[in-house]
Image (cartoon, rainbow, N blue to C red):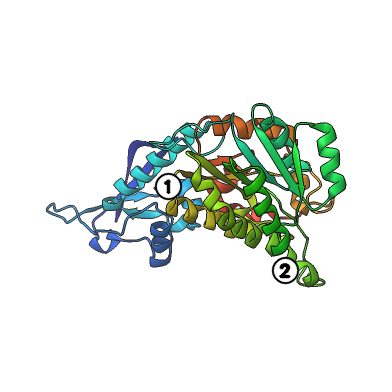
Amino acid sequence: MLVAVRKHDEITGGELHGAVSVDPDHAAPLDDDVERRAIEAGFLEPPRRMQLEDAKHRTLETEIPQNIAEKIHCPYDKRRIPSSLARFVRRAAGTMRSEAEGRHGRGQAKKKGSTTLKLTGNTILITGGATGIGLALARRLSEGNQVIICGRSEAALHQAKIEVPTLVSRVCDVADAASRRAMVEWLQAEHPSLNMLINNAGVQARRDFTADPAIDTLDQEVAINLTAPIHLIAELLPTLRQQGESCIINVTSGLAFSPMADVPVYCATKAAFHSFTLSLRHQLKATGVRVIELAPPIVDTGLGGGTRSDGAASRMMVTPEQFASEVLAQLAEGKDEVLVGIAVQTRQMGEALFERMNSRA
């Protein structure tokens, strides 16, 4: 027999609802699969089953708040958990609320002990810097810094220099080992004060594995988006570590956290680059090399050859200039994870957004 009770306990804007059971078997109604996902998502610690020791051995049950239930894909009819776990849910919900308040709709809150990034007096290399968000960042960073851009197109680099005369340019295909190594040797000889690397170069291809997955361009997409920047980091680390303070900024994507199904390889490479960035930051934390992740939303550029994922039409785009302004504001705040636009939501909700993002009207 269940007796309804209500507890007013504010959790991310909602209420906890509960029921008292006289049946001790109701101590753990959350099924194993849902409980496992809750633990993996960080919302619950491994359960310690405790019962209220009163004359009737009553056990209080509590519902998981709706927003957390959705995050762990928990069916509505299985949202009840023992009260002994409720404090873990409250703790997780409180953490979520604090993080949300710290973001103010933007990137990750500034971590304890982090310092603001020096945004002037740097020597900066931006790969893929002749167009799109690379050029927008180069334009803004050229005010007070020496900015070097590289790319595969000599014509695009020439046009970028017309727009921003102070830029230094270098033709380089970062996915080609010989071209990349030649640039690294040139940088070491001509720009030994290099202290900031922005791995921005990227390509995107639509691939339909029910028809034509365009396998002939697969290796190039993986190389430019993932393996080339990893090689470049390894080759430039000795130079970066010679500086008093230096920085690596890896450009991933909001799609690293929740992919668009029609650009599957692009999303997979960005997810892998996100993972690599976390590990690199951990490995270099005791050095003078800071590692920052920059996750753009959908930006109005020529990425994908002028054709974007079908999901892009229903998503708010930002201009490269808007994007660059937001990035610099967050870097000035000392953030190690810069999220812009819809990337905030994809980072917070991850794969829970997948069906919504990939639905077709």
* Residue 149 x/y as whole percent: 72, 43
* Residue 3 x/y as whole percent: 30, 49
Q: Considering the numbered disc 2 on the image, is that residue within a helix, a strand or a loop? A: helix
Specify few, some or many for label 1: CA neighbours under 10 Å numbering under 14, 14-19, or 20 or more: few
Res 176 visible: no
Identify which residue, 158 or 349, lies in the foreground: 158
* Residue 296 x/y as whole percent: 65, 43
Do residues under tags 1 and 2 come within 8 Å of each other at their CB atoms? no
User: In the displayed image of the protein, which residue is found farthest to the top?
Assistant: 144
Identify which residue, 278 or 171, lies in the foreground: 171
Q: Residue at x 84, y 45 (%)?
A: 156
Amino acid at the residue labelled 2: Asp
Q: Is residue 300 above or below residue 104?
A: below
User: In screen coordinates, is 204 left or right of 100?
Assistant: right
Q: Residue at x 38, y 58 (%)?
A: 39
User: In screen coordinates, is 69 left or right of 357?
Assistant: left
Q: Residue at x 39, y 41 (%)?
A: 95
Numbered tag placed on residue 287 in the rendering: 1
